């Protein structure tokens, strides 16, 4: 891995990972700051004050940063880092995805169930497909066939999706166009990088950038 350096000035849409030295869009990275008590603080919304340190949103990169003290090297001071940082980040990102789905459902911007998804798509509505990560074999392919051009999020389990939609379990779902759909794509991509199995967001063939080309994907609520 390349040697770390001091955090760069935070400007522009891209940041440099302190572990890999790779420059990427901020949507694919996680920002960290050091609190007054020297504790490392994940800043998932990239809004906390202080000089930021950025990591690619990948479990292996986070584990390397913890094992090789990259945060202390980048900050040039002592930093208290939890050894289970990757697990904590996965939990926080999973909760963010579930919260966004809950907001979309309450706003009437999300439906669950194969038939409801198919009906919405037939009416020309739909921005992001949902498929349970632990659904039956062929489940992803089944819903993908309904709208091959849409991005698909498949990082949440059937029980988690069911909790959002108020049922025992949910295998298929759909988000309608809007900022919530775009935000879910971004968070699902980061969550996928933090899970043991990977995955998260499958971009459509005409949009290799995933969430970046969705309407309002650069806006904050």
Image: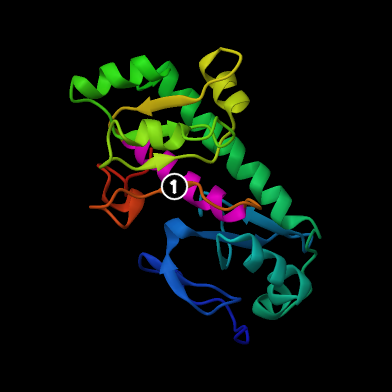
Between 62 and 120, the residue placed more toward the observer is 120
Relative to residue 218, is residue 168 depicted above or below?
above
Which quadrant: the C terminus?
top left
Relative to residue 38, is residue 181 depicted above or below?
above
- What segment is highlighted magenta in the picture? 179-194
Q: Position of residue 38 (x, y in %)?
A: 77, 64
Between 35 and 198, the residue placed more toward the observer is 198
Main SS of the magenta part reads helix
Instruction: Give the residue displayed 26% in from the left and 50% down from the top.
Output: 213
Instruction: Give the residue displayed 37% in from the left and 43% down from the top.
Output: 220
Task: Report whether 136 appears left or right of 41.
Answer: left
Is residue 108 among what the camera can see? no
Q: Position of residue 212 (x, y in %)?
A: 31, 53
Q: Position of residue 141 (x, y in %)?
A: 40, 37
Residue topped by disc 1 = 201
Relative to residue 169, is residue 186 depicted above or below?
below
Q: Secondary structure beneath disc 1?
A: strand
């Amino acid at each position: 891995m390349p040697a770390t350096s001091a955090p760069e000035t935070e400007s522009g849409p891209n940041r440099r990972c302190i572990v890999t030295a790779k420059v990427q869009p901020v949507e694919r990275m996680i920002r960290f700051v050091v609190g007054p008590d020297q504790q490392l603080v994940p800043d998932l919304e990239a809004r906390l004050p202080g000089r930021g340190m950025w990591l690619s949103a990948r479990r292996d990169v986070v584990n390397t940063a913890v094992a090789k003290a990259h945060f202390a090297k980048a900050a040039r001071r002592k930093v208290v880092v939890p050894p289970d940082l990757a697990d904590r980040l996965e939990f926080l990102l999973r909760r963010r995805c579930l919260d966004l789905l809950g907001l979309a459902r309450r706003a009437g911007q999300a439906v669950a169930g194969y038939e409801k998804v198919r009906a919405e798509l037939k009416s020309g509505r739909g921005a992001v497909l949902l498929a349970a990560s632990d659904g039956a074999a062929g489940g992803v392919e089944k819903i993908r066939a309904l709208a091959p051009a849409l991005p698909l999020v498949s990082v949440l389990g059937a029980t988690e999706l069911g909790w959002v939609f108020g049922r025992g379990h949910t295998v298929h779902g759909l988000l309608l166009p809007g900022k919530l759909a775009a935000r879910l794509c971004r968070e699902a991509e980061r969550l996928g990088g933090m899970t043991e199995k990977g995955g998260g967001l499958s971009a459509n063939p005409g949009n290799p950038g995933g969430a970046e080309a969705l309407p309002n994907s650069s806006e904050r609520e």
